[in-house]
Amino acid sequence: MSVRPHRGVVERFARLAGVAALMLSIAGCGYSLAGRGSFLPAEIRIIGVPQFVNRTQIFNLETQLTQKVRAEFIGRGRYEILPEATGVDALLTGEVSSVSVQPLSLTAQNIASRYVITMTARVELRDVKANAVLWDNPSLVFRQEYDAPNAGVVGGVIDPAAFLGQDLNALDRMTNDFARSIVSAILEAF
């Protein structure tokens, strides 16, 4: 008397074997995780990231952007990042040309309940020795939405401190997105 395996066991074994074969084939096909490589030339080892230029009325925006871009590069762990323009292989420069805040939606009392903050900037990475542009984008646009603080309205008047806090939080999120996007675009050639 022979014992036959249950049909469900055979099907599960076949599925597992198929998945294992697929995993082995993918492992050898050259795919890798994004963010691990770099499209920059091998001779670029030191990148200068001097203070960005701020052409807006937003106090200290250039400092916040520059620090976050430097930190994002450092977090990738491949390059030495210096705050100056001399003694480097490549130079990353940036300029923020505008920041605007616009209402997106209004309450029944015609008070803005949601805003969008928009920042426009220009960024360029230049190979210093070859005097060649490695990457640039002359018209970057970043947006961040945020809710107006309901608790900040007293008797129909908006408390400026509550409003400004929301505005600054949105600006902080936007500068984080900016730094991640710029560094990813430069290193991954997107």
Image (tube, rainbow, N blue to C red):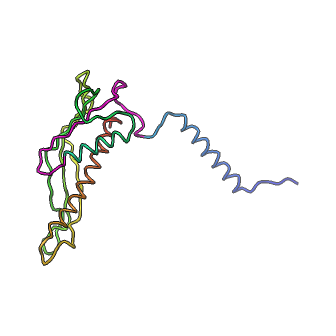
Identify the image quadrant of residue 139.
Answer: top left
Q: Residue furthest right?
A: 1
Up/down of 46 relative to 180, above or below: above
Tally of marks = 0
Q: Is residue 69 magenta?
A: no
Q: Quadrant of the C terminus?
A: top left
Give percent across and percent down for residue 173: 27, 54
In depth, the one of 72 and 1 nearer the eye is 72
x 18%, y 43%: residue:
121
x 18%, y 65%: residue:
163
Q: Residue furthest top?
A: 130
x 15%, y 51%: residue:
59
Could you tell whether 30 is left or right of 149 in the image?
right
Identify the image quadrant of residue 23.
Answer: top right
In depth, the one of 68 and 155 nearer the eye is 68
Q: What main secondary structure does the magenta stretch of the protein show?
A: loop
Q: Quadrant of the N terminus?
A: bottom right
Give percent across and percent down for residue 35: 40, 39
Give percent across and percent down for residue 73: 33, 39
x 41%, y 40%: residue:
34
Up/down of 41 relative to 32, above or below: above
Stretch of the chain drawn in magenta = 34-61
Give percent across and percent down for residue 83: 25, 36
